[in-house]
Image: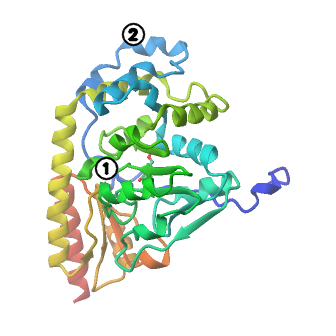
Amino acid sequence: MSKFFSSQLNKLSPYVPGEQPQGRQYVKLNTNESPYFPSRYSIDGISREELEKLRLYSDPECMELRKAIAEYYGVKKENVITSNGSDEVLAFAFQAFGSKGIVFPDITYGFYSVFASLYNLDYKKIPLKEDFSINVNDYLSTRKMVVLANPNAQTGKYLELSEIEKIVNENADNVVLIDEAYIDFGGESAVKLTKKYGNLVVVQTFSKSRSLAGARVGFAVANEELINDLNRIKYSFNPYNVNRLSILLATNAIKDKEYFEFCTKKIIEEREKLTCELTKRGFTVLDSKANFVLARPNAIKGKELYEKLKERGVLVRRFDDERISDFVRITIGSKEQMQTLLEQTDKILGEKL
Ligand SMILES: *Cc1c(COP(=O)(O)O)cnc(C)c1O
Protein backbone atom coordinates (compact mmCIF):
# COMPACT_ATOMS: atom_id res chain seq x y z
CA MET A 1 0.00 0.00 0.00
CA SER A 2 1.34 3.44 -0.83
CA LYS A 3 1.12 6.26 1.69
CA PHE A 4 -1.59 7.73 -0.53
CA PHE A 5 -4.05 4.86 -0.13
CA SER A 6 -7.27 5.83 1.67
CA SER A 7 -6.94 4.99 5.32
CA GLN A 8 -10.62 3.92 5.58
CA LEU A 9 -9.75 1.08 3.22
CA ASN A 10 -6.71 -0.13 5.15
CA LYS A 11 -8.45 -3.33 6.16
CA LEU A 12 -9.90 -4.15 2.76
CA SER A 13 -8.90 -7.62 1.65
CA PRO A 14 -9.80 -7.94 -2.03
CA TYR A 15 -11.47 -10.92 -3.67
CA VAL A 16 -9.03 -13.52 -4.95
CA PRO A 17 -10.23 -14.86 -8.31
CA GLY A 18 -9.58 -18.47 -9.32
CA GLU A 19 -6.44 -18.93 -11.36
CA GLN A 20 -6.61 -18.02 -15.04
CA PRO A 21 -3.37 -19.62 -16.26
CA GLN A 22 -2.05 -18.02 -19.44
CA GLY A 23 0.77 -20.44 -20.21
CA ARG A 24 0.23 -24.18 -19.72
CA GLN A 25 -3.00 -25.63 -21.12
CA TYR A 26 -4.94 -27.15 -18.26
CA VAL A 27 -8.14 -29.12 -18.17
CA LYS A 28 -9.66 -26.09 -16.54
CA LEU A 29 -12.25 -27.00 -13.92
CA ASN A 30 -11.62 -24.23 -11.40
CA THR A 31 -13.84 -21.23 -12.14
CA ASN A 32 -17.19 -22.69 -13.21
CA GLU A 33 -16.97 -21.58 -16.81
CA SER A 34 -18.90 -23.46 -19.47
CA PRO A 35 -17.03 -26.07 -21.54
CA TYR A 36 -19.20 -25.12 -24.52
CA PHE A 37 -18.79 -22.30 -27.03
CA PRO A 38 -21.13 -19.31 -26.86
CA SER A 39 -24.27 -19.59 -29.01
CA ARG A 40 -23.44 -19.37 -32.71
CA TYR A 41 -25.92 -16.49 -33.00
CA SER A 42 -23.77 -14.59 -30.53
CA ILE A 43 -20.65 -15.26 -32.55
CA ASP A 44 -22.24 -14.57 -35.94
CA GLY A 45 -23.67 -11.29 -34.61
CA ILE A 46 -20.20 -9.75 -34.33
CA SER A 47 -19.83 -8.40 -37.86
CA ARG A 48 -17.27 -5.91 -39.14
CA GLU A 49 -20.05 -3.35 -39.16
CA GLU A 50 -20.65 -3.89 -35.44
CA LEU A 51 -16.93 -3.61 -34.76
CA GLU A 52 -16.83 -0.31 -36.62
CA LYS A 53 -19.59 0.97 -34.36
CA LEU A 54 -17.20 0.68 -31.44
CA ARG A 55 -16.29 4.31 -32.06
CA LEU A 56 -19.72 5.13 -30.61
CA TYR A 57 -20.68 4.70 -26.96
CA SER A 58 -22.90 1.78 -26.09
CA ASP A 59 -26.56 2.28 -25.22
CA PRO A 60 -26.56 3.37 -21.55
CA GLU A 61 -30.04 1.89 -21.19
CA CYS A 62 -29.08 -1.44 -22.81
CA MET A 63 -32.56 -1.44 -24.30
CA GLU A 64 -32.26 -4.41 -26.66
CA LEU A 65 -30.69 -6.64 -24.05
CA ARG A 66 -33.12 -5.64 -21.31
CA LYS A 67 -36.04 -6.29 -23.66
CA ALA A 68 -34.68 -9.74 -24.51
CA ILE A 69 -34.21 -10.61 -20.82
CA ALA A 70 -37.67 -9.24 -19.96
CA GLU A 71 -39.22 -11.31 -22.70
CA TYR A 72 -37.40 -14.44 -21.59
CA TYR A 73 -38.72 -14.07 -18.04
CA GLY A 74 -42.15 -12.58 -18.80
CA VAL A 75 -41.46 -9.31 -16.99
CA LYS A 76 -41.21 -5.71 -18.24
CA LYS A 77 -37.94 -4.08 -19.31
CA GLU A 78 -38.47 -1.61 -16.46
CA ASN A 79 -37.93 -4.57 -14.13
CA VAL A 80 -34.46 -5.28 -15.51
CA ILE A 81 -31.03 -3.67 -15.09
CA THR A 82 -27.95 -5.03 -16.87
CA SER A 83 -24.37 -4.80 -15.70
CA ASN A 84 -20.72 -5.50 -16.41
CA GLY A 85 -20.83 -9.03 -15.04
CA SER A 86 -23.22 -9.76 -12.20
CA ASP A 87 -20.49 -8.73 -9.78
CA GLU A 88 -21.18 -5.15 -10.75
CA VAL A 89 -24.91 -5.23 -10.08
CA LEU A 90 -24.20 -7.06 -6.81
CA ALA A 91 -21.94 -4.14 -5.86
CA PHE A 92 -24.69 -1.65 -6.80
CA ALA A 93 -27.18 -3.56 -4.64
CA PHE A 94 -24.87 -3.67 -1.62
CA GLN A 95 -24.38 0.08 -1.90
CA ALA A 96 -28.04 0.78 -2.50
CA PHE A 97 -29.62 -1.46 0.13
CA GLY A 98 -26.98 -2.49 2.66
CA SER A 99 -26.89 0.45 5.06
CA LYS A 100 -28.74 -1.39 7.85
CA GLY A 101 -26.23 -4.22 7.65
CA ILE A 102 -26.15 -7.42 5.65
CA VAL A 103 -26.41 -11.11 6.49
CA PHE A 104 -25.23 -14.07 4.43
CA PRO A 105 -24.02 -17.63 5.09
CA ASP A 106 -20.51 -18.37 6.39
CA ILE A 107 -19.83 -20.48 3.32
CA THR A 108 -20.89 -18.66 0.17
CA TYR A 109 -19.59 -16.41 -2.61
CA GLY A 110 -16.44 -14.70 -1.32
CA PHE A 111 -17.28 -11.38 -2.91
CA TYR A 112 -20.13 -10.57 -0.49
CA SER A 113 -17.84 -9.75 2.43
CA VAL A 114 -15.51 -7.85 0.09
CA PHE A 115 -18.32 -5.59 -1.17
CA ALA A 116 -19.49 -5.03 2.40
CA SER A 117 -15.98 -3.96 3.44
CA LEU A 118 -15.50 -1.81 0.36
CA TYR A 119 -18.67 0.15 1.10
CA ASN A 120 -18.09 0.10 4.83
CA LEU A 121 -21.26 -1.86 5.62
CA ASP A 122 -21.75 -4.06 8.67
CA TYR A 123 -22.19 -7.70 7.87
CA LYS A 124 -22.76 -10.91 9.73
CA LYS A 125 -22.00 -14.40 8.51
CA ILE A 126 -24.59 -16.96 9.58
CA PRO A 127 -23.21 -20.52 9.82
CA LEU A 128 -24.73 -23.09 7.52
CA LYS A 129 -26.01 -26.24 9.20
CA GLU A 130 -23.66 -29.17 9.73
CA ASP A 131 -24.71 -30.62 6.34
CA PHE A 132 -24.03 -27.24 4.67
CA SER A 133 -27.70 -26.48 4.12
CA ILE A 134 -29.24 -23.10 4.96
CA ASN A 135 -31.33 -22.90 8.11
CA VAL A 136 -34.27 -20.83 6.87
CA ASN A 137 -35.22 -19.78 10.42
CA ASP A 138 -31.91 -17.92 10.71
CA TYR A 139 -33.06 -15.55 7.97
CA LEU A 140 -36.54 -14.62 9.17
CA SER A 141 -37.04 -11.08 10.49
CA THR A 142 -33.36 -10.20 10.33
CA ARG A 143 -33.89 -6.41 10.01
CA LYS A 144 -30.90 -6.47 7.68
CA MET A 145 -30.37 -6.97 3.98
CA VAL A 146 -30.33 -10.72 3.26
CA VAL A 147 -28.03 -12.04 0.55
CA LEU A 148 -28.28 -15.68 -0.52
CA ALA A 149 -26.78 -17.44 -3.49
CA ASN A 150 -29.19 -20.11 -4.72
CA PRO A 151 -27.86 -22.67 -5.51
CA ASN A 152 -25.25 -21.65 -2.98
CA ALA A 153 -21.72 -20.91 -4.11
CA GLN A 154 -19.05 -23.45 -3.12
CA THR A 155 -21.61 -25.98 -1.83
CA GLY A 156 -23.95 -26.20 -4.85
CA LYS A 157 -26.87 -26.79 -2.47
CA TYR A 158 -30.26 -25.57 -3.59
CA LEU A 159 -32.99 -24.05 -1.47
CA GLU A 160 -36.57 -24.70 -2.66
CA LEU A 161 -38.43 -21.69 -3.98
CA SER A 162 -41.08 -22.03 -1.25
CA GLU A 163 -38.32 -21.55 1.34
CA ILE A 164 -36.98 -18.51 -0.51
CA GLU A 165 -40.49 -17.09 -0.55
CA LYS A 166 -40.78 -17.58 3.19
CA ILE A 167 -37.58 -15.56 3.71
CA VAL A 168 -38.72 -12.79 1.36
CA ASN A 169 -42.11 -12.66 3.00
CA GLU A 170 -40.67 -12.44 6.52
CA ASN A 171 -38.28 -9.62 5.63
CA ALA A 172 -40.76 -7.07 4.32
CA ASP A 173 -38.74 -4.15 5.73
CA ASN A 174 -35.47 -5.02 4.07
CA VAL A 175 -34.21 -6.20 0.73
CA VAL A 176 -33.63 -9.88 0.06
CA LEU A 177 -31.15 -10.47 -2.75
CA ILE A 178 -31.03 -13.90 -4.38
CA ASP A 179 -27.92 -14.48 -6.46
CA GLU A 180 -28.92 -17.01 -9.09
CA ALA A 181 -25.58 -17.43 -10.87
CA TYR A 182 -26.22 -21.21 -10.93
CA ILE A 183 -30.01 -21.38 -11.19
CA ASP A 184 -30.07 -22.75 -14.74
CA PHE A 185 -28.58 -26.10 -13.75
CA GLY A 186 -31.71 -27.54 -12.20
CA GLY A 187 -33.21 -24.94 -9.87
CA GLU A 188 -36.35 -22.84 -10.18
CA SER A 189 -35.79 -19.08 -10.49
CA ALA A 190 -37.24 -16.63 -7.99
CA VAL A 191 -37.79 -14.08 -10.79
CA LYS A 192 -41.52 -14.76 -10.80
CA LEU A 193 -41.72 -13.74 -7.13
CA THR A 194 -40.47 -10.24 -8.01
CA LYS A 195 -43.99 -9.45 -9.27
CA LYS A 196 -45.42 -10.21 -5.85
CA TYR A 197 -42.73 -8.83 -3.51
CA GLY A 198 -41.38 -5.30 -3.51
CA ASN A 199 -38.31 -6.26 -1.48
CA LEU A 200 -36.84 -8.96 -3.71
CA VAL A 201 -33.88 -8.55 -6.07
CA VAL A 202 -32.86 -11.51 -8.24
CA VAL A 203 -29.40 -11.39 -9.80
CA GLN A 204 -28.24 -13.58 -12.68
CA THR A 205 -25.25 -13.83 -15.00
CA PHE A 206 -24.38 -14.83 -18.56
CA SER A 207 -21.05 -16.18 -17.29
CA LYS A 208 -22.02 -19.73 -16.38
CA SER A 209 -25.00 -21.20 -18.20
CA ARG A 210 -24.64 -18.99 -21.30
CA SER A 211 -20.91 -19.45 -21.94
CA LEU A 212 -20.10 -15.73 -21.85
CA ALA A 213 -17.86 -15.33 -18.79
CA GLY A 214 -15.37 -13.28 -20.79
CA ALA A 215 -18.04 -10.91 -22.11
CA ARG A 216 -18.91 -9.80 -18.56
CA VAL A 217 -22.70 -9.53 -18.56
CA GLY A 218 -25.05 -9.82 -15.61
CA PHE A 219 -28.48 -8.50 -14.70
CA ALA A 220 -30.97 -8.03 -11.92
CA VAL A 221 -34.76 -8.36 -11.95
CA ALA A 222 -36.91 -6.61 -9.35
CA ASN A 223 -39.86 -4.26 -9.10
CA GLU A 224 -39.45 -0.95 -10.88
CA GLU A 225 -38.70 1.07 -7.75
CA LEU A 226 -35.77 -1.15 -6.76
CA ILE A 227 -34.44 -1.10 -10.33
CA ASN A 228 -34.60 2.71 -10.26
CA ASP A 229 -32.56 2.67 -7.04
CA LEU A 230 -29.95 0.46 -8.69
CA ASN A 231 -29.91 2.83 -11.67
CA ARG A 232 -29.21 5.75 -9.36
CA ILE A 233 -26.01 4.00 -8.36
CA LYS A 234 -25.16 2.97 -11.90
CA TYR A 235 -25.60 6.50 -13.28
CA SER A 236 -23.43 7.80 -10.45
CA PHE A 237 -20.67 5.41 -11.39
CA ASN A 238 -20.57 4.21 -15.00
CA PRO A 239 -23.55 4.88 -17.31
CA TYR A 240 -22.04 2.90 -20.21
CA ASN A 241 -21.36 -0.09 -18.03
CA VAL A 242 -22.02 -2.77 -20.66
CA ASN A 243 -20.01 -2.49 -23.86
CA ARG A 244 -21.48 -2.71 -27.37
CA LEU A 245 -20.16 -6.16 -28.20
CA SER A 246 -21.29 -7.67 -24.94
CA ILE A 247 -24.79 -6.25 -25.34
CA LEU A 248 -24.97 -7.89 -28.74
CA LEU A 249 -23.49 -11.20 -27.59
CA ALA A 250 -25.84 -11.47 -24.62
CA THR A 251 -28.94 -10.40 -26.53
CA ASN A 252 -28.34 -13.10 -29.13
CA ALA A 253 -27.46 -15.68 -26.48
CA ILE A 254 -30.65 -15.33 -24.47
CA LYS A 255 -32.74 -15.70 -27.62
CA ASP A 256 -31.09 -19.03 -28.45
CA LYS A 257 -33.15 -21.22 -26.13
CA GLU A 258 -32.45 -24.42 -27.98
CA TYR A 259 -28.68 -24.25 -27.55
CA PHE A 260 -29.03 -23.09 -23.95
CA GLU A 261 -31.15 -26.13 -23.18
CA PHE A 262 -28.71 -28.43 -24.93
CA CYS A 263 -25.75 -27.09 -22.91
CA THR A 264 -27.45 -27.04 -19.51
CA LYS A 265 -28.85 -30.54 -20.00
CA LYS A 266 -25.40 -31.91 -20.84
CA ILE A 267 -23.89 -30.29 -17.77
CA ILE A 268 -26.60 -31.66 -15.51
CA GLU A 269 -26.02 -35.15 -16.92
CA GLU A 270 -22.27 -34.92 -16.40
CA ARG A 271 -22.78 -33.59 -12.88
CA GLU A 272 -24.94 -36.55 -11.92
CA LYS A 273 -22.41 -38.97 -13.46
CA LEU A 274 -19.49 -37.32 -11.71
CA THR A 275 -21.29 -37.33 -8.35
CA CYS A 276 -21.85 -41.05 -8.76
CA GLU A 277 -18.27 -41.81 -9.86
CA LEU A 278 -16.71 -39.80 -7.03
CA THR A 279 -19.01 -41.42 -4.47
CA LYS A 280 -17.89 -44.85 -5.73
CA ARG A 281 -14.32 -43.75 -5.04
CA GLY A 282 -15.12 -42.91 -1.42
CA PHE A 283 -15.60 -39.16 -1.81
CA THR A 284 -18.22 -37.26 0.15
CA VAL A 285 -20.04 -35.27 -2.54
CA LEU A 286 -22.54 -32.56 -1.66
CA ASP A 287 -25.80 -32.72 -3.56
CA SER A 288 -25.37 -30.03 -6.22
CA LYS A 289 -27.78 -28.18 -8.46
CA ALA A 290 -24.96 -26.06 -9.90
CA ASN A 291 -22.32 -26.57 -12.62
CA PHE A 292 -19.80 -27.80 -10.05
CA VAL A 293 -19.58 -30.25 -7.18
CA LEU A 294 -17.92 -29.79 -3.83
CA ALA A 295 -16.31 -33.08 -2.86
CA ARG A 296 -14.08 -34.42 -0.11
CA PRO A 297 -11.81 -37.36 -0.82
CA ASN A 298 -11.38 -39.85 2.03
CA ALA A 299 -7.94 -41.32 1.27
CA ILE A 300 -6.10 -38.05 0.75
CA LYS A 301 -6.36 -34.41 1.83
CA GLY A 302 -8.25 -32.09 -0.49
CA LYS A 303 -5.20 -29.87 -0.73
CA GLU A 304 -2.98 -32.74 -1.81
CA LEU A 305 -5.50 -33.86 -4.41
CA TYR A 306 -5.70 -30.30 -5.74
CA GLU A 307 -1.90 -30.07 -6.00
CA LYS A 308 -1.44 -33.48 -7.60
CA LEU A 309 -4.20 -32.85 -10.10
CA LYS A 310 -2.56 -29.56 -11.01
CA GLU A 311 0.80 -31.27 -11.59
CA ARG A 312 -1.05 -33.59 -13.94
CA GLY A 313 -2.64 -30.74 -15.86
CA VAL A 314 -6.09 -30.70 -14.23
CA LEU A 315 -7.01 -27.51 -12.43
CA VAL A 316 -9.73 -27.58 -9.75
CA ARG A 317 -10.44 -25.11 -6.95
CA ARG A 318 -9.93 -25.33 -3.24
CA PHE A 319 -10.61 -22.94 -0.38
CA ASP A 320 -8.89 -22.19 2.89
CA ASP A 321 -12.17 -21.70 4.85
CA GLU A 322 -11.87 -24.16 7.68
CA ARG A 323 -15.20 -25.88 7.08
CA ILE A 324 -14.40 -26.76 3.49
CA SER A 325 -10.61 -26.87 3.51
CA ASP A 326 -10.59 -30.64 2.91
CA PHE A 327 -12.85 -30.35 -0.13
CA VAL A 328 -12.15 -29.60 -3.76
CA ARG A 329 -14.61 -27.82 -6.00
CA ILE A 330 -14.78 -29.31 -9.46
CA THR A 331 -16.44 -27.48 -12.33
CA ILE A 332 -18.54 -29.71 -14.56
CA GLY A 333 -16.87 -29.76 -17.95
CA SER A 334 -17.38 -31.82 -21.09
CA LYS A 335 -17.61 -35.62 -20.99
CA GLU A 336 -13.97 -35.85 -22.11
CA GLN A 337 -12.80 -33.45 -19.42
CA MET A 338 -14.66 -35.42 -16.75
CA GLN A 339 -13.02 -38.62 -18.01
CA THR A 340 -9.58 -37.03 -17.74
CA LEU A 341 -10.35 -35.80 -14.24
CA LEU A 342 -11.41 -39.28 -13.13
CA GLU A 343 -8.44 -41.01 -14.80
CA GLN A 344 -5.98 -38.67 -13.12
CA THR A 345 -7.78 -38.96 -9.79
CA ASP A 346 -7.56 -42.75 -10.02
CA LYS A 347 -3.84 -42.57 -10.68
CA ILE A 348 -3.31 -40.27 -7.71
CA LEU A 349 -5.41 -42.44 -5.39
CA GLY A 350 -3.62 -45.53 -6.76
CA GLU A 351 -0.24 -44.13 -5.72
CA LYS A 352 -1.58 -43.84 -2.19
CA LEU A 353 -2.37 -47.55 -1.83
C1 LIG B 1 -19.72 -16.56 -10.81
C2 LIG B 1 -20.54 -15.90 -9.78
C3 LIG B 1 -20.88 -14.55 -9.85
C4 LIG B 1 -20.19 -13.59 -10.78
O1 LIG B 1 -20.50 -13.69 -12.03
P1 LIG B 1 -20.06 -12.61 -13.10
O2 LIG B 1 -21.36 -12.36 -13.78
O3 LIG B 1 -19.08 -13.31 -13.96
O4 LIG B 1 -19.53 -11.38 -12.45
C5 LIG B 1 -21.76 -14.04 -8.93
N1 LIG B 1 -22.25 -14.79 -7.95
C6 LIG B 1 -21.91 -16.08 -7.82
C7 LIG B 1 -22.49 -16.86 -6.70
C8 LIG B 1 -21.04 -16.67 -8.73
O5 LIG B 1 -20.69 -17.92 -8.58
Query: Taking 81 as reference, is 234 left or right?
Result: right
* Residue 144 picture location, percent across and down: 59, 58
Front position in the image: 324 or 190? 190
Front position in the image: 55 or 315? 55
Name the residue that disc number 2 marks: 49
Residue drawn at (31%, 26%) of the image: 71
Name the residue that disc number 1 marks: 183
The reply to whether residue 137 is in sight is yes
Quarter where residue 41 is shown: top left
* Residue 96 picture location, percent across and down: 62, 43
* Residue 128 picture location, percent across and down: 43, 73
Residue drawn at (56%, 51%) of the image: 173
Q: How is the image coloured?
A: rainbow
Q: Residues within 10 Å of mark 2 (few under 14, many from 20)?
A: few
Residue drawn at (39%, 10%) of the image: 49
Please, which residue is most extreme toward the bottom here?
353
Is mark 1 in CB contact (under 8 Å) with mark 2?
no
Q: Secondary structure at mark 1?
A: helix
Mark toward the start of the polypeptide (1 vs 2): 2
* Residue 88 picture location, percent across and down: 54, 41
Q: What amino acid is labelled 1 in the image?
A: Ile
Residue drawn at (48%, 74%) of the image: 127
Q: Is residue 26 above or below residue 197?
A: below
Query: Taking 13 as reference, is 264 left or right?
Result: left
Query: Taking 283 as reference, is 22 left or right?
Result: right
